[in-house]
Image: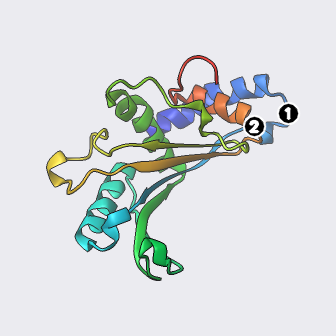
Amino acid sequence: MAARLFERYNAEIKPALESEFPKNKTLTAKLEKVVISVGAGEAMKDSKLMQNIEDTISLIAGQRAVKVIAKKSVAGFKVREGMPVGVKVTLRGENMYNFLDKLCSIALPRVKDFRGLNRNGFDGRGNFNFGLDEQLMFPEVVYDNIIKTHGMNISISTSADNDQEAYRLLELVGVPFTKGRA
């Protein structure tokens, strides 16, 4: 599946980007990494729930997720140094292409009343961020194994210099954006 998306990038997407944004061929925009992260919130004190979140994200990503540990104590949030505060996984290469293909063709179309991702998620440097409300849209997740539903943040990093190039790259990859004005 991922090989199909990577082959399509080399055969169709890269030449299209080179013609739209003419510059050195080595500077053509490409996908660098995808980071999936979950803030634990109340799961900090419940190790069973934290392990369930970690297992779910690992299952979705197809790669082992890691716990994020607090570096500093913050009294206002009742966080102590060394406590697990979230889970993240960084995808590159084949796993990245697998995940993006699954996200765009299977998971996002399963969201009820989905009209596309908001274009305002670009950061000005060619990276795109968006959030999902729950993990149940992914086909690997079994509803009976979930202790509590949680959202996740997905960050797609590209080598593009600006948002226009990154938007066009992601559009050609198949990321569904909302129609109309940006």
* Callout 2 amino acid: Thr
Q: Position of residue 99 (x, y in %)?
A: 44, 43
Who is closer to the viewer here, 111 or 35?
111
| Residue 16 occupies quadrant | top right
> Sequence-wise, which precedes: disc 1 or disc 2?
1
Left or right of residue 146, residue 72 in this image: right
Residue furthest to the right in view is: 23
Left or right of residue 143, residue 130 in this image: right
Residue furthest to the top in view is: 180
User: Quadrant location of the C terminus?
Assistant: top right
Left or right of residue 88, residue 119 in this image: right
| Residue 3, disc | none
How far apart marks 1 and 2 lie (CA) works out to: 8 Å
Q: Are marks 1 and 2 in contact (CB under 8 Å)?
A: yes
Q: Position of residue 9 (x, y in %)?
A: 60, 32
Q: Position of residue 88 (x, y in %)?
A: 45, 61
Q: Secondary structure at mark 1?
A: loop
| Residue 28, disc | 2
| Residue 82 occupies quadrant | bottom left
Residue drawn where x is 83% and y is 28% of the image: 22
Disc 1: which residue: 23
The reply to whether residue 4 is in sight is yes
